[in-house]
Amino acid sequence: MVYISRQEHFNAAHKLHNPKWSEERNREVFGPCANANWHGHNYDLIVTVKGRPDPETGFVIDLKQLSTLIRTHIVDEVDHKNLNIDVPFMQGQLASTENLVIAFWKILQPEIERISSAKLHSIKLYETPRNFVEYYGEEVN
């Protein structure tokens, strides 16, 4: 099995805020990430697919096609946007990095299968150079 990754970048704003909680509780749990005026991140997104190289191309997946798919279905939807307000697939959810990476998976998995025999293996999303989330498609309860 060969694993191949593509990295993309986007910038977005959000705030962590549970509408069921008081402002005090939100500040207590989320700290400065609950700032009423939002805050932003320079995200790095790494999408890894797995499969066997095609005997005719030597590719597991055409990285140009994968890049176009990620940019079209993810980056164009979130770049320079407010994740809480401007992104339809995040409506009704806390705009955490964890929830964001799960939403990305649900969008990318069928798109990757549509263009290739490769399978989505993982998505890694860096919110900061020191904070990142990895998701492998397992069900989250």
Image (cartoon, rainbow, N blue to C red):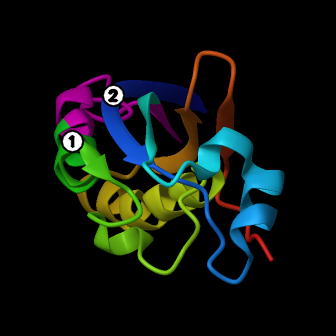
Q: Residues within 10 Å of mark 2 (few under 14, many from 20)?
A: some
Q: Residue at x 55, y 28 (%)?
A: 2
Q: Are marks 2 and 1 in contact (CB under 8 Å)?
A: yes
The residue under label 1 is 71
Measuring from the top left, give residue 119's x and y in whole percent: 49, 51
Where 17 falls versus 48 (above or below)? below
Measuring from the top left, give residue 9's x and y in whole percent: 33, 27
Query: What residue occupies the far front of the structure in this picture?
Result: 24
Where 120 falls versus 129 (above or below)? below
Q: Amino acid at mark 2?
A: Glu
Q: Residue at x 38, y 27 (%)?
A: 6
> Disc 2 to disc 1, how far (Cα)?
8 Å
User: In which quadrant is the C terminus drawn?
Assistant: bottom right
Where 71 falls versus 94 (above or below)? above
Instruction: Depth check: give the residue in front, 12 or 6.
Output: 12
Looking at the rendered structure, the secondary structure element under dot 1 is helix
Q: Amino acid at mark 1?
A: Arg
What span is colored magenta in the figure? Answer: 45-67
Q: Quadrant of residue 94?
A: bottom right
Q: Residue at x 38, y 64 (%)?
A: 107
Measuring from the top left, give residue 100's x and y in whole percent: 52, 56
The residue under label 2 is 8
The answer to which of marks 2 and 1 sits earlier in the sequence is 2
Where 85 falls versus 13 (above or below)? below
Q: Residues within 10 Å of mark 1 (few under 14, many from 20)?
A: some
- Specify whether 81 is left or right of 137: left
